[in-house]
Amino acid sequence: MGLDWKPLNKPKKGMENEFKDLFEILDGRKKTKLSFFDKIRGKKNYNETEVQNRFFEISTTPYETLNAPRVGFDTKATEWAKESFENRTDKGQNLEEFMKEMYGYWVVDLVELHDGIPTYIALHDEAHVFRGKFLDDCEKIMGPELFDEAYSSKLSEEAIDYGNRILSLANTYARENNLEHLRDVRNPPDADELSPESLVHILYSSAKWVKWWGERGHGYEAYF
């Protein structure tokens, strides 16, 4: 399956500390068992479902940050869904049933391209999910510490820091290979997949994706 980076929700204003606590519980960094003093302070010990529900309750989705249009809410998204009817999986559905099922769907494919919509994506993922498996080609350049860190989910501050370190590495590698012009090129270069051109483009693209989301308050889930 390989590695994918999926943008996380971001905390609503005033909910940053609770959001961080819930994320660390869901990520396995923090246990839910409360101390005696936590109980005195009125904290609650949630089960996993309650943690997940609360996490989503106090946060904003990546789709909202992208300002992605929604089927049934925005005309262009609704028209997109109607045009997708012929490609439906269940050929037994009529248009009314199909549109009811699609109601509320966020259409990321209709968002204008930018650094938060990566070039490197998996076949069946949504357009804003970065295909981290491409970093496998960059493992030797990144070194074990930076490469292994790609498999850890991050909050926004951690994401920005990680993105900056990848960007610094990309800049150094680009200078060494006279490839600095690729920093602002969106589409992959016409070069062999393990060429310096391809590798530096992957590094730049991953760094810019991480920073775009981090700077807007979103971390990401490392899914593999």
Image (cartoon, rainbow, N blue to C red):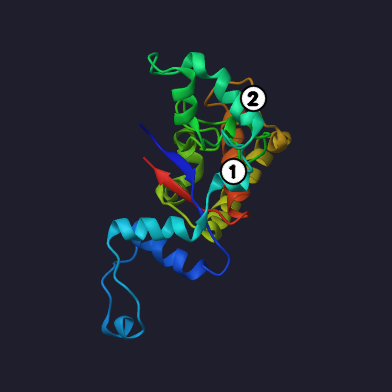
Which mark lies nearer to you, 1 or 2?
A: 1
Residue 30 drawn at (x, y percent): 33, 66
Residue type, mark 2 in image: Pro
- On residue 121, the disc is none
Residue type, mark 1 in image: Trp
Query: Could you tell whether 92 is left or right of 108 in the image?
Result: left
Q: Residue sitting at 47 percent across and 55 percent down?
A: 154
Residue 74 drawn at (x, y percent): 64, 35
Query: Looking at the picture, does residue 42 appear above or below residue 77?
Result: below
Q: Residue sitting at 44 percent across and 48 percent down?
A: 221
Circle 1 Cα neighbour tier, 10 Å, few/some/many (<14 / 14–19 / ≥20)? many
Secondary structure category for the residue under label 1: helix
Secondary structure category for the residue under label 2: loop
Quadrant in which the N terminus is drawn: top left
- On residue 189, the disc is 2
Give the labeled residue for mark 1: 209
Marks 1 and 2, the one that precedes in the sequence: 2
Q: Residue sitting at 61 percent across and 34 percent down?
A: 201
User: Looking at this view, is 211 or 128 the one in front?
Assistant: 128
User: Looking at this view, is 35 or 46 the one in front?
Assistant: 46
User: Looking at this view, is 91 or 36 the one in front?
Assistant: 91
Residue 88 drawn at (x, y percent): 45, 18
Circle 2 Cα neighbour tier, 10 Å, few/some/many (<14 / 14–19 / ≥20)? some
Query: Looking at the picture, does residue 134 appear above or below residue 22?
Result: above
